[in-house]
Amino acid sequence: MTSAPRLPGTDGRKMSKSYGNAIFLTDSPDLVSKKLAPMVTDPARKRRTDPGNPDICPVYDLHRIFSAGETIDRVNRECRTAEIGCLDCKKLAAGHLNAFLAPIQERRKPYEQNPKKVWDVLEDGTAKARAVAQTTMAEVRAAIRLT
Ligand code: SF4
């Protein structure tokens, strides 16, 4: 239902930890670039001068998910005319993907440095859920007695 209905992994199949083709939220910018460098592209584009077809390229799917509109338009145009090479295209994709990951990694940092915070959040959530469940159960018991 979206312009990019599935997130491709680095081998072009759906991204999955079990396929070993995943990019993780914790991957550093360097690692993301390294993972994207050998990523599969349009198989018909063998030489730099061959025009490509972004519609069948998983790197372009990543652009459609993570890149800015002008980058998506540029890749869509310049791939078909061989103005942009796959290496540069992947560097652009890595840049946008890293920009997407940066704020997530920033928010994660305090929890990495102090894992006890995670337990505090979980315990707090458990206490809130328990209170709601107890209220619901009281309502259920009352309703059963009424019927
Ligand atoms: S230029 Fe980009 S979209 Fe085109 S085939 Fe290469 S990696 Fe895929």
Image (cartoon, helix red, strand yellow):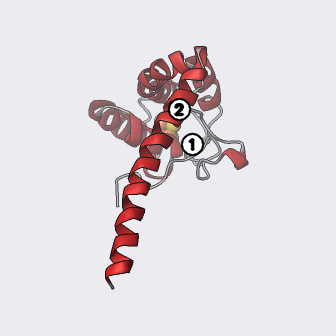
Task: Depth check: give the residue in front, 78 or 101.
Answer: 101
Q: Secondary structure at mark 2?
A: helix
Q: Residue at x 38, y 61 (%)?
A: 136
Please determine whether, in this image, residue 58 is positioned above or below residue 75: below
Residue assigned mark 1: 41
Kind of residue at badge 1: Thr
Measured from the top left, where is residue 119 in percent x and y? Answer: 58, 29
Residue 144 got which mark? Answer: none
Residue assigned mark 2: 86
Answer whether residue 40 is visible to the viewer in this image. yes
- The response on whether ligand 1 sits within 8 Å of label 1 is yes
Q: Residue at x 50, y 48 (%)?
A: 7
Structural distance between the alpha carbons of marks 2 and 1: 8 Å
Measured from the top left, where is residue 112 in percent x and y? Answer: 59, 19
Task: Depth check: give the residue in front, 34 or 104.
Answer: 104
- The response on whether ligand 1 sits within 8 Å of label 2 is yes
Q: Is residue 87 left or right of residue 104?
A: right
Q: Residues within 10 Å of mark 1 (few under 14, many from 20)?
A: many
Measured from the top left, where is residue 15 in percent x and y? Answer: 59, 47
Please determine whether, in this image, residue 134 is positioned above or below residue 108: below
Q: Residue at x 38, y 79 (%)?
A: 144
Task: Depth check: give the residue in front, 143 or 117.
Answer: 143
Q: In terms of image quadrants, where is residue 111?
A: top right
Please determine whether, in this image, residue 91 is positioned above or below residue 72: above
